[in-house]
Amino acid sequence: MKERLQNLLRLDLKTEALSGLTVALALVPEAVAFAIVAGVDPLVGLYAAFMVGLITSLFGGRPGMISGATGALAIVMAELVQSHGVQYLFAAVVLMGLIQILIGLLKLGKLIRIIPHPVMIGFVNGLAIVIFLAQIKQLRPNGVWMQGAELFTMLALIAITLAIIYVLPRLTKAVPSALAAIVVLSVAVIFFNIDTTTVGDLGAIKGGLPVFNVPMVPFNLDTLYVILPYAFIFAAIGLMESLMTLSLVDEITGTRGSGNRECIGQGLANVLTGFFGGMGGCAMIGQSMINVKAGGRSRVSSFIAAIALLMFILFASGLIEQIPMAVLMGVMFSVVIGTFEWTTFKLARNIRKSELLVIAVVMALTVAYDLAIAVLVGVIISALNFAWEKGKSIELERVEEKDDLKIYHVKGTLFFGSVYHFLEAFQMQEDCEVIIIDFEHARVFDHSGIEALNTITERYRAAGKTVYLRHLSNKCLRLLDESKEVVKVNVIDGTHPEPVTVD
């Protein structure tokens, strides 16, 4: 408790508060836009942004990270809303949260560590492109590109916003540059009566406090049959985006969050959100980057962002609705620039083609489909490539011949990926009557490797020759013991000068 108090006293509360306010302003159009994508009322998206943001700020595993309604979830939620209605969405969100809590309690959040770095790069770049494309859509209302003065005004405001964001920090850091851009340009648009698209054009954001309601769906197996597949998909996408955003914020801040705690925090947030009429959500990479780069490092900034968003809904909807969309687009474009891993182009000349393929595939699938599929495919490709490369590493280090005895010294790892290379390495027809395979510098990793030992023994036995295995590790001996009913091999003591069959 004393340590937490000391940490709180060391915080720059002004920076944390201003950072949270900046994030709240950026959350409004995002939440409204994602609600429209999901096919629900704008307030459903705003309530989700508030509830998920508030709960994760208190109980999540990564201080300074921002959560709310996201596009990745909105896209897959739309199908459920269209087929069964918004009440089924609320029920699925509650179940989604319970699944996420269970994953956290089982401590499966640490599985994020197995995601290879090329997949992370593809994820970050893919989401940057998704954010970029989402902003570009604002220039095509109803599918038609803006023209003339309307387009020029939008582009000019975007350019001025970016100029303020990148120039102001060189003059002063007293106020987050993104917040300064939003306030200054909003006042200018209102004062000079500039005709441009505003937040209010997306939909009204005024509302009351979210009210507790049990989702109005039949409580039977038919309902569970409908919502369970969606709940698993929502949970998977939500946790993948949250945990990967957590890793990214960890890298930027040089600190470490808790993946398992984040799973529980996200789950709790979604359970409550489903009961309070929200569409659910997860960590938001764009808003998290805004917060971190504006100086938000603690739970204070994310807590203030959630509370400020609620205040906007209750008391300041009229003012917020007058914020030009172009200004918020400029803020998000700065997020795109800061999020995209521009070093990818340099890496293209220095990394293996297989890793470059993983980056490209994850990027493409993140943009074309969704994050869960992209990450899953990226991990599978990386794993297969690892198995292929590792499989080629097994080799015969050297061969000794002594009268009627031949010794093969193996080097590397014998597992499912290297079995083929191992079996092809022996010259059975030319070998002596007695063969020793020495594993002093090799390891047998799995049952595919054990089966390979059995296969090579059987091949030599069929040719009237005997194979002995030497210097097997304790793990390999245990695997052999587990398979003794079907695997028949000869093992000898590595220190014995002559082969002796061990029963």
Image (cartoon, grey):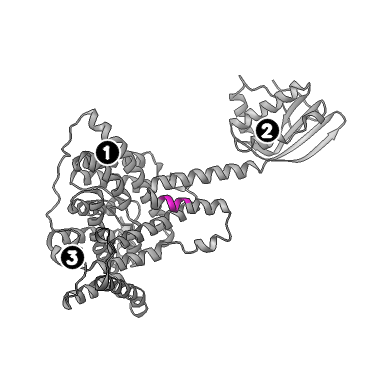
Find the residue positioned furthest to the bottom: 171
x, y percentage for residue 1? 30, 55
Local crowd at mark 1 within 10 Å, few (<14), some, or many (≥20)? many
Q: Check disc 2 and report its element: helix, strand or loop.
A: loop
Label 2 or label 3, whichever comes before in sequence order: 3
Find the residue positioned furthest to the right: 403
Whether residue 485 sits left or right of residue 40 in the image: it is: right
x, y percentage for residue 205? 16, 58
Q: Check disc 3 and report its element: helix, strand or loop.
A: helix
Between the C-alphas of marks 2 and 3, the distance is 71 Å
Residue 176 in which image quadrant: bottom left
Amino acid type indicated by mark 2: Leu
Check the image and report above or below for 407 versus 118: above
Magenta stretch?
Answer: 361-365
Judge by depth and name the residue closer to the eye, 337 or 156: 156
Residue 432 in which image quadrant: top right
- Asked if residue 490 shows in the view, the reply is no
Whether residue 233 sits left or right of residue 185 in the image: it is: right
Say which residue label 2 marks: 472
Say which residue label 1 marks: 95
Question: Are the residues at dot 2 and dot 3 in contact (C-beta closer than 8 Å)?
Answer: no
Label 2 or label 1, whichever comes before in sequence order: 1
Local crowd at mark 3 within 10 Å, few (<14), some, or many (≥20)? many
Mark carried by residue 320: 3
x, y percentage for residue 296? 32, 64
Quarter of the picture containing the C terminus is: top right
Between the C-alphas of marks 2 and 1, the distance is 49 Å
Judge by depth and name the residue closer to the eye, 248 or 57: 248
Q: Which tag is nearer the camera, tag 2 or tag 3?
A: 3
Amino acid type indicated by mark 3: Ile
